[in-house]
Amino acid sequence: MLAPFVEKQLPVEILGSGSKTKIGRPMQTAGAITTASMHGIWMYEPTELVMSAHAGTPLAQIEAELAANNQMLAFEPSDIGPACGGRRGTQTIGSVFATNSSGSRRITVGAARDHLLGIEAVSGRAELFRSGGRVMKNVTGVDLCRGVSGSWGTLAVLTEVTFKVLPAPEKTVTLVYRGLPDDIGVELMCAAMRLPYEVSGTAHLPQSIAARLETAVLAEHGESITALRLENFEKSVDYRSNAMRAALKVYGEPIMIGSTASFEFWGELRRLSVLPYNEQTCLWRISTAPLKGPKVVAAIRRHMPVEVYYDWSGGLIWVEVPASADAGASDIRRAVAVHGGHATLIRAAASVRSSVEVFQPQSPLAERIIRGLKTTFDPLRLLNPGRMYANH
Amino acid sequence: MSLRMPVPDKATIARRGEIVAKLQKIAGSNAVIADEDGRRTFETDGLNAYRAMPLVVVLPQTTDEVAAILRYCHGEGIKVVARGAGTSLCGGALPLEDAVVVGVSRMNKVLELDYDNRFARVETGITNLAISNAVAAEGFFYAPDPSSQLACTLAGNLAMNSGGAHCLKYGVTTNNVLGMKVVLMDGEILEIGGPHLDAEGYDLLGLMVGSEGQFGLITEATVRIIKAAEGARPMMIGFPSSEAAGQCVSAIIASGIIPVAIEFMDKPAIEVCESFAKAGYPMDAEALLIVEVEGSEEEINDLLARIAAIAEPFAPTTVQISSGPAQSAKIWKGRKSAFGAIGRISDYYCMDGTIPLSQLPLVLRRIGEICGSHGLKVANIFHAGDGNLHPLILYEANDPQQAERAERAGAEILTLCVEVGGCLTGEHGVGIEKRDLMTTQFSQVDLVLQMRIKTVFDPDWLLNPGKVFPLEMLSGTGLPDAA
């Protein structure tokens, strides 16, 4: 598949379904290869909580197969393509791991890469390699699964992935608190995470963002919402939701939404429905320590109007800013530098993405390691060249 | 024992006096152990069949001291072996005669505890259990819990990506680390991650964890701390056969319950642990599962009742729910002290392979056959939920022939694990023990790629050489032939 490009030393764009092509730095390539033709689940052992699929298998097919067995991908992969003009619901399982795409449940169960058990991939040397396996615990050799996950196709082309799956919850309840300002909403989320009830999702949507929700039962209130999700066996959810309400009563009386509406609401967050594609704005993804979230936002707001919402109990902030020549990069990166964390420019015009650093700039030492890794996997710089970092 | 190590460099050994003096200047004479008796304390680790007198041992107290030591060694081309508490079961911390041992045991401070943001920042010489103890008053804990948690350091856990009995629910070390400070071999200090989750970019954190002291020396780490459940309680289920126990584990997981831990012991293991811990283990069972669940009292009762019902079709000989904290502690004491208990009756060689659960009956039968064919006895302890086997091969260490046979049986067991779709090591690491078996799991291309990554972090291959990668892929000096 890659060999002709490597032989002729031609740079190549690596695609799954192509739903995220407008994310990252624009590239100059001689062609593209897609893994979409390599599809199919070839191993699924529900009692061992493990599945293997060819990288081009649509995520939707995998989630349907899991749902039929009351199981799920616990890290709740997000679908950020639509927010950047890509098609909704088309992404492949390979791209989920290549971009380490994790949703709201990440705060309790870990990221995509925490669920990746084994890979088969082709490096920029056109060599097929494997790492990991199909078992839950494996510390044999260098962990290339994690190394490749999140590298956005710049190190290797995933051809097969083996990953951990988990039982789907019997019941879901979301406690929704209304009308809290950002800092109190984040405080509430952190307080909830300090309770022994395994809260599996915490998000705060200020009033203007909550108004964009399609989930009718939540959009109609016209207030900010702070949502806390509990998932478990029915008895546990009933007990824990009551205990939580009591423990957090100082924050008001929440409305409780059940499994169906919860699925709809958290599903909206998974696909960023509240931040739809819009060429007049740019979109940033900022990761910081949870309590720092509102501080980062306040610092950015001093320089530009922003629309935000908080996930991961305040640690993941999606920030929408007006389109500008640098998408607000210098002010945003300064705010993040002060409070700690990192910022990634998810949506901006191609001209902007080629002139500012899309991914968080690295220290010179980390840069040296990153360059070394790129050279190790892809010495000719053929795979998605420049997509993450201008020089490699 | 039969594993070869790289030939020590005589010229370095000849310079010992000069190296000791320089290290004393960098870290202070109290930090340097140069006398023979002192060095002997460090000559082995948990794989104590292998020994080598270290060139010199240095126990720095700050990251800057570590950086200065590595910078000096790098400049002089001196090898370095990093060491935590020296509990590695695979020879990961085995010294080399021509290498400086840099131990982090004096760097054991808690630097920052943050319950709202749910992290602890610590120096890596801290013991695993001390992290949980530091946050216990607030009802938090650090999840990975290797059996050696009282002694082993976080540094060693990071190097080996350690697991433990409770990792079924909470993941292993790599899933619980947010950031770290790493001293590279040239003395540069690399900071990765922090209190935030999932920095974009290549996962340097993920590459460092499990790199067995070959990429850098980790001096500080930010780890995730988790709020403990309201309560936890184990139950014991005895079975007439290992097959029935294995099938019951599958049935529990198929039901949608993920217990915090599912531990398996076979009859020989049950007998030894019971005589040690008096935990009330069922002596008539061929196999025992210890299943622990968490939650409120009511939730625990509900889950344990469900599990008892799931176990019923597999004709359990015993179903016993822990009567309270005292019995729970005994049940876990028996399991967690299994290695020590078996060590009282015999020398043993502790293996660590992982298999797909469906292969359990076949693998247990074959383990018995393999050990039998070498005239050795075996006891099996097993993190059943995630397929991580710990066969303990019993042998007489003073009998070189038996020791040799134990090692051969171990290699055959690990090869079997790979053949049935598993892997060579679930949580102990490769070290020297499984180094020469790596070719059974990886192709030449896979291994060369891994070695090239090692070269990115440590271009001169000075850090913990002679481990992880098969010696035949390295030259006599421990450097890759291709380098």
Image (tube, rainbow, N blue to C red):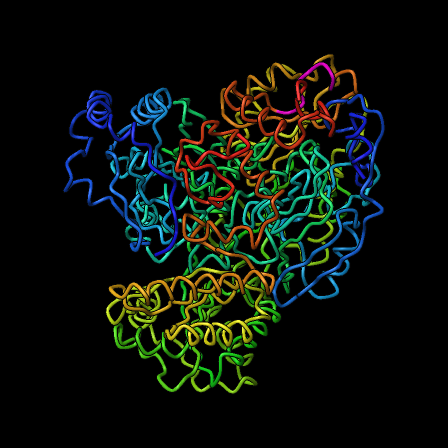
Do we see residue B209 in this rendering?
yes
Quadrant of residue B39 within the rendered picture: top left
Q: Is residue A286 left or right of residue B119?
A: right
User: Does residue B186 sit above or below A250 in this rendering?
Assistant: above
Q: Is residue B300 magenta?
A: no
Do we see residue B227 in this rendering?
no
What residue lies at 53% left-to-right and 39% top-to-bottom? Answer: B206
User: Does residue B334 sit above or below B435 in this rendering?
Assistant: below
Q: Which residues are magenta?
A: A353-359
Q: Among all residues in the image, which is located at the extreme top?
A: A325
Quadrant of residue A305 within the rendered picture: top right
Looking at the rendered image, the quarter that the C terminus of chain A falls into is top right
User: Does residue B298 sit above or below B40 in this rendering?
Assistant: below
Looking at the rendered image, the quarter that the N terminus of chain A falls into is top right
**A194 or A339: nearer the viewer:** A339
**B100 or B470: nearer the viewer:** B470
Q: Is residue A225 left or right of residue B407?
A: right
Q: Is residue A41 left or right of residue B115?
A: right
**A6 or A301: nearer the viewer:** A6
What residue lies at 41% left-to-right and 60% top-to-bottom? Answer: B230
Q: Is residue A358 left or right of residue B64?
A: right
Residue A338: percent from left, percent from top: 49, 20
What residue lies at 59% left-to-right and 38% top-to-bottom? Answer: B449
Residue B263: percent from left, percent from top: 44, 68
Q: How many marks?
A: 0
Residue B335: percent from left, percent from top: 35, 68
Residue A386: percent from left, percent from top: 71, 22
